[in-house]
Amino acid sequence: MWICQSRTCSRQGAARVLQAFRANPVPDVMVIASPCMGQCGNGPMVRVLPDDVWYWRVCPEEVPAIVKRHLQGGEPVKAMLYPIVH
């Protein structure tokens, strides 16, 4: 899983999103601080691999839902999917 830490995403709170994922670890899921993912202005961006699921405008309060429903339950959180990709 990549969490964009570019300048734009950082201004939008990406560091807090990264911290929230690291505070909610999931076995066999690596949380990686990513360089720019090319979607500036739509972040913080989160990309879950190998599913290739993109979440946009993620805030720390939404991280538990992604962890529980997607990473543990296998179902992406549809309301948070990045519409340009999905």
Image (spheres, grey):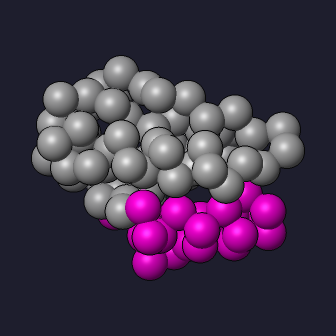
With 49 as the anchor, is 28 left or right in this view? right
Residue 57: percent from left, percent from top? 30, 59
Is residue 54 visible in this depiction of the protein?
no
Residue furthest bottom as drawn = 79
Q: Is residue 14 above or below residue 75?
A: above
Would residue 20 be counted in the magenta stretch? no
Pick the front one: 68 or 49: 68
Pick the front one: 20 or 55: 20
Residue furthest right as drawn = 27
Residue 50: percent from left, percent from top? 69, 38
Q: Is residue 35 above or below residue 27?
A: above
Residue 21: percent from left, percent from top? 57, 50
Q: Main secondary structure of the magenta part?
A: helix
Is residue 39 visible in this depiction of the protein?
yes
- Residue at screen point 42% across, 50% down: 17
Residue 41: percent from left, percent from top? 14, 47
With 24 as the anchor, is 55 left or right in this view? left
Which quarter of the rendering shows the C terminus?
bottom left
The number of numbered badges drawn on the structure is 0
- Residue at screen point 42% across, 61% down: 60
With 78 as the anchor, is 16 left or right in this view? left
Would residue 71 be counted in the magenta stretch? yes
- Residue at screen point 75% across, 40% down: 29
Quarter where residue 10 is shown? top left
- Residue at screen point 55% across, 29% down: 32
Residue range corresponding to the magenta coloring:
60-83
